[in-house]
Image (cartoon, coloured by chain):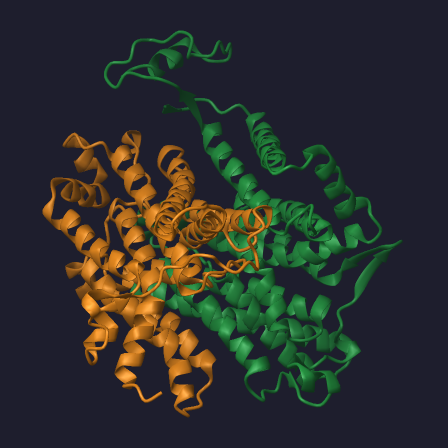
Chain colours: A green, B orange
Amino acid sequence: MKFERRLNYPRWLTFAVPVASLVLAAIITGMVLVATGHDPLTTYHQMYQSAITAHGGLTSTFVYATPMLFAGLAAAIAFRMRVWNIGGEGQIYMGAVGAAGVGLALGSWPRPLLIAAMMTGGIMCGLVFALIPGVLRAYFRTNEILVSLMLNYAAGYFIYYLIYDSTSYWRDRTSFQARVFPLGKNLAPKANWPVFKIGAFVLPFGFVVGIVVALLLWMVIKATRYGFEMNVIGDAPAAADYAGIRTKRKIVSVMAVSGAIAGLGGASQIGDFGHTLDPRGLQQAGYGYTGIVVAALGLYNPLAVVLVSFLIGALTNAGYALQGPHFPVGLVGTTQGIILFCVLGGEILARYRIRLGHAATAPPVDQEALPADDERPPALAAAEVQP
Amino acid sequence: MNKNIFVTLAVSAIAYGTPLLLAGLGELLTERSGVLNLGVEGMMLMGAVTGFTVSQKMHGPTWLILVVALIAAAAAGGVMALIHAFLSITVRVNQIVSGLALTIFAGIAGLSSYLGSVWKVGGQHGLHQFRRINVFGLKNVPVIGPIVFHNDAFVYLSWVLVIVVSWYLYRTRMGLYVRSVGESPDAADAMGINVTKYRYLHTIVGGAFAGIGGAYFTLAIAPIWTDGLTAGYGWIAIALVIFAFWRPDLLVVGAYLFGVLSSLGFTLQARGVHWPTEFFSSLPYLMTIVALVAASTGWAKRRLGTPAALGRPYSREAA
């Protein structure tokens, strides 16, 4: 099998490739379902129903989509610049710790101020935590993938320690239930973030904040010097050095922005949904890792990440809603993985043509392998087959 | 229990360190060929569930069942690695994203969990298990006996594999070729080495090692399957390869050091030292960060090389 670079990139491919990849993913998932004795069409219909049309379905889809949006944006902004922040998971934990701490401490403040303070708390904790891999990468050239990954585990043990193994400020030591089983303190109802109700559908405040963040990031990338420099560093680090861009500072600041967004996601977990620091819930959800998938599927474009987070949120919600003997929880990750493989593979295949069965030296002009494409100028077609 | 604390720690270091050593050796081979595979956790889980299922469903003498289960676990890990190899080597997708996708696909809420429920092995008590062997009847020799002569077959397998991999990398022609593919695929290609073939081969073998490492959990430590039972060992294995500067001999040291730290909290608690277990549990991760920083200083970079082409897809057109 050989790949050849496409010399012209038809515009319709931009839309056709992701759609074709999703269809392919649906077919492969269907094959997995058939192989294990399920009817794929029935399953897909049930998934659609429970994620969108069922009572409360759309509302719970947004419960999953909101943290995925934040984690996706956090990953997208860093990955664009080829700074591989895998630490969204830990930064979400720390953001949740910060927001819950602020929410508990400042419970007497007026509501808008309290909510703003919780957001700030989450942002600051996520930001500072992300600075560790950021600074190490920028000034010591330490691999940020592994450092941020290791910190996820350290953060996981840290929040576990706060609730289960210590008498910390976050732990509830008064209520009856908390004496039976360790729990986090509940925040005052005032600290619950507002919701937007449209009929029976409830849109969480966090998702709206996430959309605003996505728009801001998109504008920064498209229309500012900061965004331009990010793209240069990502695409051509050597050129960025020659152009006098301060790469090290930029790495630190992009890590900080990424961590801040993830931290805000952690704050949203407290303010929008949990209202208490729940280590097990956070760890089982693993939104930080899913966010990387979301970012990759959205090709690191903030606006596309909004859409993808909704889709993956719907998929996850459907998975958990249908969970039972006929729909094991393992299908959630399996499906996500298949979609990701297909979209990743498809994106590259859009830029290359596949040729099957080729001699290694001096390939003969294979007329059948050359598609009869009227748009291709003959000169280009000839250039392509030069050995 | 009036055992020597050194012996207790060493024995638990081997127990906790063996899956790390096996998976780490595999990742080391993969990375030496220039491919970074972050899907180790997923491959380990697939090996764990496949090996366990085979050991539950097969009939026959125990030794045969366990050998077949081990081969099945290696095959499961290898097949998972093949997905990564195809995406990262042939299609040239970003290796980080592809590896993460593999972990999500096969991991705690993915295919390994799905297969566990389809094969209905969750919560079953295992019928067969690798047991400790009393080698030459020397297990009662003080200190050395329990550490060296009283382990299960996995441990001895891992020791053999360390020697084999060291010999392979440094003493054979193929090993030299692998290292050159990881350092400079252009030069290797110009020499007539088939870069694609070498990378595929070592990615798949790396996956097979990870599958065996995962099977250690279900076939040796405790014969039971639960979702995500490798608990992040796959990630530590990746860190360990860097910690060991891509050298099999240092990998042994690293794996057992991590093993000691994993068990130190419990061992000390049993002796009345009450530090939070979370502190000891997070020590391996924090130590890895320290090791990474140390390894990335200029001195270390010069002497202990990362495979220069690690994580970079190779294509002739870009050269």
Quarter-wise, where is residue A6 in the image?
top left
User: Observer-nearest residue: B270 or A329?
Assistant: B270
| Relative to A366, A59 lies left or right | right
Q: How many marks?
A: 0
Outermost residue, top side? A367
**Residue B58 rendering spot, x and y as whole percentages:** 46, 46
Outermost residue, front side? B61
**Residue A287 rendering spot, x and y as whole percentages:** 58, 59
Kindly tell me whether residue B236 is visible in this rendering.
yes
Outermost residue, bottom side? B272
Q: Quadrant of the N terminus of chain B?
A: bottom left
**Residue A187 rendering spot, x and y as whole percentages:** 72, 79
Q: Quadrant of the C terminus of chain B?
A: top left
Kindly tell me whether residue B319 is visible in this rendering.
no
Q: Is residue A74 above or below residue A112?
A: above
Quarter-wise, where is residue B179 in the image?
top left
Q: Residue at x 71, y 48 (%)?
A: A318
Quarter-wise, where is residue B80 in the image?
top left
| Relative to B317, A334 lies left or right | right
Q: Residue at x 59, y 46 (%)?
A: B118
| Relative to A32, A314 lies left or right | right
Q: Residue at x 20, y 45 (%)?
A: B183
**Residue A51 rendering spot, x and y as whole percentages:** 75, 47
Q: Is residue B166 above or below residue A142?
A: above
User: Observer-nearest residue: B297 or A171?
Assistant: A171
Q: Residue at x 66, y 80 (%)?
A: A183
Q: Is residue A100 above or below residue B228?
A: below
